[in-house]
Image (spheres, grey):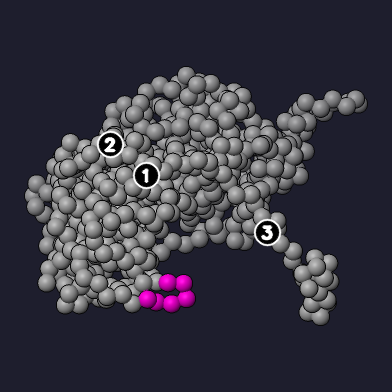
Amino acid sequence: MSDDKFDVIVVGGGIAGTVASYLLAKEGLSVVLVERGNFCGSKNMTGGRLYAYSLEEVMPGFANEAPVERKVFKERISLLTMDQSVTLDVRSPKFAESGNDSYVVLRSSFDRWLGEKAESEGAMIVAGYRVDDLIVRDDKVCGIISNGEEMDADVVVLADGVNSLLAEKLGMKKPLRPEHVAVGVKEVIQLTRGEIDERFGLSGDEGCAWSFFGANTDGIQGGGFLYTNKDSISIGLTCNLQKLSEGSKPLMQLMNDFQSHPVVAPLVKGGNLIEYSAHLEPEAGAKMIPQLYGNGVLVIGDAAGLTLNLGHKVRGMDLAVISAQCAAQAILEAKSREDFTASSLRKYKDLLDVSSAIQNIEARDKYLEFMENPLLYNAYPLMIVDMLARLFVVKGGRAQTIFDDILKNIEALGKNQIENDFKAVKKL
Amino acid sequence: MNMKIMVCVKQVPDTEMIKVDPVTGSLIREGVPSIINPFDLNALEAALQLRGEYGGNVAAVCMGPPQAEEALRDCLAMGADSAVLISDRVFKDSDTLATSYVLSLAARQFGPFDLILCGKHSLDGETGQVGPQIAEFLGWNQVTYVSKMTRTEEGFVIDREMEGGIEKVMTRTPIVCTVTKTHYEPRKATMKGKLMAKKAHVETVDSKTLNGLDTGRIGLVGSPTSVAKSFVPPDGEPGTVIEEPTAVESAAKLIKLLTKAEAI
């Protein structure tokens, strides 16, 4: 038994954990955040972009103070074949409007800042300690155990990331399955500010977010991403783990090929690799969401399976903020009743269920099967890029109409297949 | 028998992160995080073990910039009973003589101590002079390169780590010891220790509140040593790898190369 007891112990210093700690400490609760890295953010990873709307609600104007890299002004999507590409480039002042804005971030500095915000509200951060287990007495979570040392709390908030072994130990979460997660790899490549501005057509603090589909994942469900930081770029790939293991190329090979692609190579040229990281992300939608609450315990953020990858929009950090908000509110209410049982903490799930986080995840579920269609990752990008490429070729002889070209491609792929896929799209 | 122990600590740049400017030859300290000099942690561990065995209390003392308070909080988290930060702009550029002068004044002010423990040397300066100089200023016995300490009636039996052997020394207190890493692997602070240290009081003294300070003996003025030149040692020639298909052939090649180099 330990001598002191805290109101809340939060396990994990990511977005969800730091924001929950911030909100709870702000309301006067005694909060300890335990982080296994040397500081909040030291072991955390994102592809790159935070949609601001939810954090804006928690900390209005945060982007003026927080160490964000660049504000996204430009969105690009590319379809790639081995040697061809089609790129859509969208630039709009809408992206910068308050409420629509999004920022490229690097987690080691961003989460650290969030941790400092939580500390400034009175939360106590203990970094460098891995929580090995939870104290469970009479079917209630009563605290944490790290390196044999116990620490008690009324509520333990599990914000320990995608592979939450603690939630698994409690039986709240099933072990991850390779088909339900994507593995993401990312390199941070250092370039000068000037080089980035020039290569991406940016100025000042403007940033670019860029998704890539097609040959870069070798037909595997997934995609590539590139985000511009202040003086580096974050570039990487995500691939379904199961499909990757069935594929013929290891991820590093795909990453090398991706960076050698004629579209990508000039963007990274001459850059200095300063960081390499890899991470799992849940991608099986609502069925990944574990039991979210129990006696004396809540699960938030990635640990709660709250991510949403639509290819061109990859979300997780904004949903982590929402879950932290819901959890904080539920805990505050539970505290006012001094009742930390599951039935009292159920409020968290109720709040989350009506939040945009869960609603968007559930809405996305019907896309899941569609997105598993392998044609989306090889044949279709190839067909589209090929057709558009031919549109610009003049070589004498009688020109073919686009219509003829489309028909020919459809025949090549098999009419039935395309009809079925088209129906699937219409159903969405 | 309770002992009062003072442990001297300093912050050094994290050597794993440090780079040398290839042009000027000086250390690039900007953006390099500070850590507690690792040997100082061995000294603190020795102090905590002695306190555990014989009772007493441990004071961690640091002369450094205001941010060195963080290092002292780490000492408190590990179990030090109190912490003193000696911090003032006028101490800037102090060499080992000036530094040990200041630390010896602190030992008088916050003592009396039975024992002062230092790391065997710092990772940045590597002089190993501060400990012995504190002993000289105080007129105490000193033992350097201490790997193990055992209490006796009148003092200590101390293992001194020498090249090729251990020297056993018996001495009376008060003593200054500089500690090696052999036996005193620093403990990891507990979570509760960390939490307690966040709130703990760190006593701070400056040039005005440090008793008996002669300002002519500190800072650049009070430092007779100065760095004449620093340089990066040139990279050595790469070695030759002999990897012939068979051991006999490899041996033959080795002999040939040695003969050519007139080494045999």
The residue under label 3 is A248
Q: Residue at x 54, y 57 (%)?
A: A241
> Can you tell which of label 1 and label 3 is closer to the viewer?
1
> Who comes first in sequence, dot 2 or dot 1?
1
The total number of labels drawn is 3
Residue most toward the left? Answer: A337
Question: Where, by quadrant of the figure, is residue B20 drawn?
Answer: top right
What x and y, as percent, mark residue A150? 21, 65
Helix, strand or loop for the magenta stretch, by majority: strand
Give whichever of B220, A307 is nearer the camera: B220
Element type where label 3 sits in the image:
loop
Kindly identify the amino acid type of the residue bearing the numbered disc 2: Gly
Q: Which label number is shown at residue B95?
A: 1
Question: Residue A166 magenta-drawn?
Answer: no
Mark 2 vs mark 1, CA separation in Å: 13 Å
In front of the other: A44 or B79: B79
Residue A141 in sight: no
Give a yes or no on whether discs 1 and 3 share a subunit.
no
For the magenta stretch, what is the residue range?
Answer: B162-167
Residue pictured at 70% horizontal, 56% vertical: B237
Do residues under tags 1 and 3 come within 8 Å of each other at their CB atoms?
no
Residue named by callout 2: B216
Circle 1: residue type:
Asp
Q: Nearer the viewer, mark 2 or mark 1?
A: 2
Chain to which the residue tagged by mark 1 belongs: B
Residue ID at (55%, 59%): A242
Q: Are marks 2 and 1 in contact (CB under 8 Å)?
A: no
CA–CA distance in space, label 1 to label 3: 62 Å
Please say if A140 is above or below A326. Answer: below
Find residue B98 and report its image quarter: top left
| SS at mark 2 in the image | helix
